[in-house]
Amino acid sequence: MNPFTYELSHLETLESESIHIFREVAAELERPVLLFSGGKDSVVLLRLAEKAFRPGGFPFPIMHVDTGHNFPEVIEFRDRRVAELRERLIVVSVQDSIDRGRVIEERGPRASRNRLQTTTLLDALAEHGFDAAFGGARRDEERARAKERVFSFRDDFGQWDPKRQRPELWALYNGRIRRGEHVRVFPISNWTELDVWQYIAQERLEVPSIYYSHSRQVFKRDGMIYALNPYVPLIDGEQPFQASVRYRTVGDMTCTGAVLSQARTLEEVVAEIAATRITERGETRADDRVTEAAMEDRKREGYF
Amino acid sequence: MSVLTNGHAVRTRTRELLRIATAGSVDDGKSTLIGRLLYDSKQILADQLEQVMRTSERRGDGYLNLALLTDGLRAEREQGITIDVAYRYFQTPRRKFILADTPGHEQYTRNMVTGASTADLSIVLIDARKGVSEQTHRHAYIASLLRIPHLVVCVNKMDLVGYDEAVFESIVDELSDWASRLDIGDITFIPISALHGDNVVERSRAMAWYGGAPLLYHLEHVVIAPDRNLADVRFPVQWVIRPNSEEHHDYRGYAGQVAGGVLRPGAEIMVLPSGQRTQIAAIDTYGGELDAAFPTMSVAVRVTDALDISRGDMFVEPDDPPVASRELDAIVCWMSDEPLRAGARYSIKHTTRSARAIVAELEHRVNVNTLAHERADELALNEIGRVHLRASAPLMLDAYARNRATGSFILIDEATNDTVAGGMVLGAR
């Protein structure tokens, strides 16, 4: 902020817009919840929530949908960060949904719980009566997301209908819903991956250690590098090897790829992102590679 | 450049973040232009390009179809159309851009208004072979209605008219003449070929007669007029921060986003609609107290007196208040299949305040081609008209022309919960 010119920097502009969105939801909806994945985008959401509501507490709990296939570093980070914030954490698990027969586990070496999360998430929203769920999705991530509103209306079944979105004008958000419906709210819709990293650097935010270069046993599949892990059996011919890697996104170990990297500090990561020639989801997310419209299909079903 | 704020002359610096809205008809090459802008400014990454190449090949396009970069949804790719507002992000060393890409077909005017509502600059495309169309008029009119300070008209497909200067000039003349009746601050014409990249990022060799800058250069360097109101203090209270902790037992922070003017500790303010007066004790942020807060900062304001203040109230300067009124005249863009009629009731959301509103009178409909005011019994989807509204509670109103934040509102259908109109205040009654 420059007090002599009354102009905000681009990060300040984005930040104040996001804070406005947080407060608007808190004021207009009955039972919001903040969806936290442990990834960099939800780390930024937590800081923005602090900026919106401190010195008060958050007017909503934090919820994590635990697939059981998360990186242990991320779970450790989650618990520590929420404890520091002294806010309430709800953990719902895909394993529970499987045990209760709500979903059926996929089989085979390419099995993933990515899609099963949707049922766990929708069940939890209904069970707790949440009518708004903050998410860290950004419009620069993916083509379907580029068309989603900040307040994304979901029907009784949690579904997104791209043809029936409410017009969103100025900073006037319409959060009116009927019982059983909810809104997904994306306060950092207008941020890019680089904005997120620049903000993390500016605010000196801690992110899970796997975002920084580290040495790990990995293997190659379909042109991506995966961590050797208990949930993904190797297919014939796949050879694990040691490599210096980091993650650009944090999802399940089953579908999140690593990138070869030597970036060990925030500054090095920012420099690497600024110079990259591949998108984060294209480089590291197997879940988007299924079809050209993989994200669109999952969003329609109620995915994050 | 300097602008006047409450008594203080200040310098302004280059805007870092520029919000752009684009509009164009189905076939005038808007998606190709945006694809070209992203591609030539090296914002398209290798995997996105590979996906476009694969799809181009499968469809038998015979060239790298840059339009595929921006068509997000399956139906759009299949039908070769754009359904909804898509947001694109790109940057150059000089600026960051947020581009709201809106479809041009008539039934989606509501999306265009949505994209344009926050824009600093609007790009309108014209097919050089077809010249100025009804769509062009509609887009220019909406840009002026929403008070986007800068309009860039790209005359596209110049390659298909032999890069003929006369074609370009006749379009410039025709549209300039028509637009002279509108309130547009700055209008710039650029002859381009999005398909071949002429005058998008690189200067065109085929159009040496054109002395202006290519599109991207213009976007990077255009001096954005100070569209924010720094003169009239407007702070709609959005949320009251009241910690439950011992440490902050007596804390009351009135949180919100500054909508106008410059707030300073010690300044006297009036709380509307009650009219009570108090002083700003402090301006809080997570990072500490501030000496000043201005649009569009999100802050929390503490005041010196214990007053009953809640969401929907507004802090203003006592000698420069907005008009608190239940009656207003406004222009509305209608966005619902169910037409607007006099006598209908809606929920109105204006700043952080919601009330009910009845359409007391539909005064006229605007013919966007002739700009004529026509008598009308209803406003159909995508139509624009002037209404007289009566609200159930006073609203703190500024004319939209004076302040985009305190002069705008939406109407919501209470039965369907849909947003049915965007409105711009002309004045209180």
Image (spheres, coloured by chain):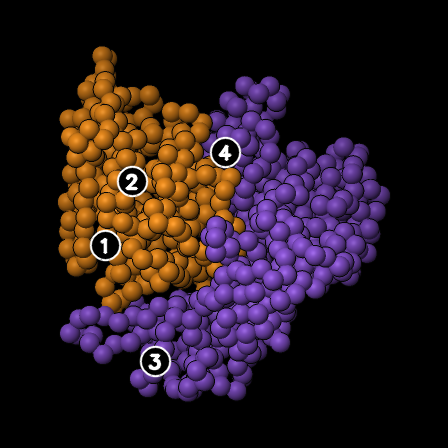
Question: Which residue is rendered at x = 37% and y = 34% of the image?
Answer: A301
Q: Secondary structure at mark 3?
A: loop
Q: Secondary structure at mark 1?
A: loop
Left or right, B164 with respect to B381, comes to: right
Q: Colour in which chain B is shown? A: purple
Residue A24, percent from left and from top: 38, 61
Question: Which residue is rendered at x = 19% and y = 38% of the image?
Answer: A93
Label placed on residue B73 = 4
Which residue in the rendered view is the most extreme toward the top? A236
Which subunit holds the residue at mark 3? Answer: B
Q: Nearer the viewer, mark 2 or mark 4?
A: 2
Task: Sort mark 1 into few (<14), some (14-19) or many (20+) by Cα contacts within 10 Å.
Answer: some
Left or right, B320 with respect to A141, comes to: right
Residues at discs 1 and 3 in contact (Cβ within 8 Å)? no
Q: Colour in which chain A is shown? A: orange
Question: Which of A225/A250 is in front?
Answer: A250
Mark 1 vs mark 4, CA separation in Å: 33 Å
Q: Nearer the viewer, mark 4 or mark 3?
A: 3
Callout count: 4
Amino acid type, callout 4:
Leu
Mark 1 vs mark 3, CA separation in Å: 28 Å
**Residue receiving disc 3:** B308
**Residue receiving disc 2:** A122
Mark 2 vs mark 4, CA separation in Å: 23 Å
Residues at discs 3 and 2 in contact (Cβ within 8 Å)? no
Task: Sort mark 4 into few (<14), some (14-19) or many (20+) by Cα contacts within 10 Å.
Answer: many
Which subunit holds the residue at mark 1? Answer: A
Left or right, A81 with respect to B311, comes to: left
Question: Which of A227/B111 is in front?
Answer: B111
